[in-house]
Image: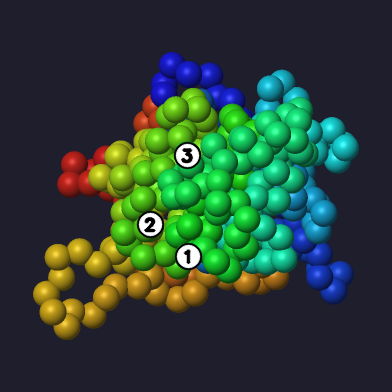
């Protein structure tokens, strides 16, 4: 991935919502990039800003809040792009898989009609070609008897099959970037593995970049090339997934990894990061993680640490990063 030029570059992305006259910063100064064929993992607790980041990239968040910064795509800035122009990119060049397929799919329409709706909006295919493409996509994502299942409604599919339908709709127009917002939520482990394998295989076959939002660090370790850790709307650590998971530099990343149960004796209490994430309308003055951090020092309470390079490809936003036995930043 080092030799490839990014197809997506996000620079200083900020998304602010407003409630009762108060500004609620949901995404703050987020910068990231994705290359063709690369899978970028985006992790963090609920409310850390992962889903809002995806919606801000594709232009959905600006319906409800203020989005600033740059999202560079094929030489254009999606943030500054008018809605009528952006609609030609949404679904056609950049596609998104939402968290819960049962609420994303229309229960009153057959999956075939919903697939063909996407093809009508995002391709120049004629009616018969759209039908053939819909059958092809259902078959591609592993749904048996694809031609017959086009006539079925979402409630006639299992949870895993509905998620496959969502993937088929997202990929029907051969996008170059896929934003996957927790595509395996609420699925059992076996189906989760199948869905992730499917996304990875299609990403390689279609030379497509992927941003994968998940809570599961095990999923990240198995599927992602690079990793970005979010907390309170900011990226606090990012870099190659193996480097970050082998030697995390931010105390929050360490806490997330300690929260993963692994080789524990029976009845051993599970670890959880102390405290709770801050509310958007009550963010601390300095580092947002300071009230929960055992490594907090005086500067953490006063100033917000910048995301700083610690190696060629590793970045950490911390005044007191975790060190290894040699005293170097992990």
Badge 1 crowding class, 10 Å Cα cut-off, few under 14, some 14 to 19, many 20 or more, is few
Q: Read off the residue under disc 2.
A: 192
Q: Read off the residue under disc 1.
A: 158
Q: Quadrant of residue 282?
A: bottom right
Residue 44 % position (x, y): 47, 58
Q: How far is mark 1 from mark 3, CA to CA?
A: 17 Å
Tag 2, which secondary structure? helix
Q: How far is mark 2 from mark 1, CA to CA?
A: 13 Å
Please give left or right for residue 127 compared with residue 183 in the image: right
Q: Residue furthest left?
A: 265
Where 101 sits versus 127, above or below?
A: below
Tag 1, which secondary structure? loop
Q: Residue furthest front?
A: 148
Residue at 34% x, 52% y is 193
- Among the two numbered marks 2 and 1 on one chain, the one whose residue lies closer to the N terminus: 1
Q: Read off the residue under disc 3.
A: 140
Tally the numbered discs: 3
Front residue of 94/149: it is 149
């Amino acid at each position: 991935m080092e030799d490839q030029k990014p197809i997506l570059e996000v620079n200083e992305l900020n998304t602010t919502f407003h409630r009762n006259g108060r500004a609620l910063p949901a995404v703050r100064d987020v910068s990231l990039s994705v290359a063709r064929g690369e899978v970028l993992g985006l992790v963090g607790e609920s409310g850390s800003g992962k889903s809002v980041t995806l919606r801000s990239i594709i232009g959905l968040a600006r319906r409800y809040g203020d989005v600033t910064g740059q999202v560079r795509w094929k030489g254009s800035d999606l943030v500054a792009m008018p809605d009528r122009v952006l609609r030609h990119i949404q679904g056609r060049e950049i596609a998104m898989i939402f968290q819960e397929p049962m609420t994303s799919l229309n229960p009153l329409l057959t999956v075939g009609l919903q697939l063909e709706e996407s093809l009508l909006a995002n391709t120049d295919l004629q009616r018969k070609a759209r039908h053939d493409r819909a059958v092809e996509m259902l078959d591609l994502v592993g749904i048996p008897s694809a031609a017959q299942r086009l006539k079925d409604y979402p409630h006639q599919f299992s949870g895993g099959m509905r998620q496959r339908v969502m993937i088929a709709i997202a990929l029907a127009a051969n996008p170059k970037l896929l934003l996957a917002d927790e595509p395996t939520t609420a699925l059992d482990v076996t189906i989760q593995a199948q869905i992730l394998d499917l996304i990875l295989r299609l990403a390689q076959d279609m030379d497509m970049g992927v941003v994968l939002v998940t809570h599961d660090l095990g999923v990240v370790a198995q599927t992602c090339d690079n990793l970005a850790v979010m907390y309170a709307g900011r990226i606090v650590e990012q870099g190659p997934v193996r480097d970050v998971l082998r030697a995390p530099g931010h105390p929050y990343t360490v806490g997330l990894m300690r929260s993963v149960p692994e080789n524990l004796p029976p009845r051993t209490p599970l670890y959880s990061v102390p405290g709770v994430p801050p509310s958007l309308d009550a963010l601390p003055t300095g580092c947002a993680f300071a009230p929960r951090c055992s490594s907090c020092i005086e500067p953490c309470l006063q100033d917000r640490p910048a995301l700083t390079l610690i190696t060629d490809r590793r970045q950490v936003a911390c005044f007191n990063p975790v060190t290894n036995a040699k005293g170097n930043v992990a």
